[in-house]
Image: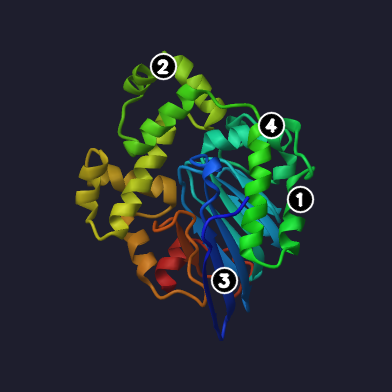
Amino acid sequence: MAAGRVRVRAGQGPGGSWEFATSAPHPRLRPGVLGYRGIRLALDRPRRRLETPIGAVTLLLGFEGPVRISGAGRPTVSLVSVYSGLTTTPVVGEHDGHIAGVEVLLAPWAAFTLFGTPQHEVADRAVDPDDLPHEPGGGVGGRWRGTGELAAALAALPTWEARFGLLDDVLTRWSAAGPPSAARVRQAWSLLVRSAGAIPVPRLAEEVGWGVRHLENHFREQIGLGPKAAARVLRLQRARRLLAAGRSPAETAASCGFYDQAHLSGEFKAMTGCTPREFTAARKRPGPVAPAADRLNGEATSLVLPVSADDPSGRSADFSKTRSRG
């Protein structure tokens, strides 16, 4: 199975080299598999990046070096391959400057099918995908017994196009073998995404023909968050998109269904660790040798954070230092 057209961006400078490759998955995998992104960084210093909540599950199949992932209220983990469920709070990922792998972006209901794992068990968590409660494909992984073997096979291939093609084949098999998601859950998720989180939960339940409690239970199992929490993430996602396009916080608040600008600022702070103005200003500052690699194409989802000079690991740095250090 052939992958979609591969687009590669690369650069090199005094601080090291970087390469990002993107591709759409095979049409058979859409709309559940949203995209592929290849990453290769060879930098001369550690890298820290703040990741904000998005309406997708992320699977990183790592080739080289671990990523240390931390966040308020969650255990800090150090992993080479990472499965990240839906989250409502920001996390910080950091590494020594050398990292390579392929990131797969998944609709939550597709992640439920591919891995056979109730998504509420991995919400607000980052875990080794081989430690998920069930094996890929609901226990039928085919040639690849786990994501560790798959990552090694991807690393051995010579081109991003070949890697994305292998992912098309493997994910197609896993999808066929895994537990199907409920059509009404997929419909409810689609309605939430199209409305950018604006549709009320009772109306959402009415649209799909379920009671609110029934919808909430199935939604948590196959999406990870309840519909109200998922709507918060999708509203934030749209707000970031509008702010990045130059809309003011007041205009953004009105367009995204927040009560007022203060409501937007409070939600933004709770879910990203900074205010809308701080986030927008940080995105505009000159970056290091490698740009922030946003998980969603064309959207502002990440911030590259400075690494403290007296703590090369970056563990003592926080967002306030990002503002003061520029």
Residue found 28% across the figure and 42% down from its top: 263
Q: Residue furthest front?
A: 1
Query: Mark 3: which secondary structure?
Result: strand
Q: Amino acid at mark 4?
A: Ala
Res 19 label? 3
Label 1 or label 4, whichever lies nearer to me, is: 4
Label 4 or label 2, whichever lies nearer to me, is: 4
Callout 1–callout 4 Cβ contact below 8 Å: no
Callout 3–callout 2 Cβ contact below 8 Å: no
Q: In the rendered view, tell whether residue 143 sits above or below residue 175.
A: below
Callout 1–callout 3 Cβ contact below 8 Å: no
Residue found 38% across the figure and 47% down from its top: 237
Q: Position of residue 261 (x, y in %)?
A: 23, 47
Q: Earlier in the sequence, mark 1 or mark 3?
A: 3
The CA distance from mark 1 to mark 4 is: 19 Å
Name the residue beneath numbered marker 2. Answer: 212
Name the residue beneath numbered marker 1. Answer: 148
Q: Earlier in the sequence, mark 3 or mark 4?
A: 3
Quadrant of residue 136 in the image? Answer: top right
Q: In the rendered view, tell whether residue 323 sits above or below residue 117.
A: below
Q: Amino acid at mark 3?
A: Glu
Q: Position of residue 191 (x, y in %)?
A: 36, 31
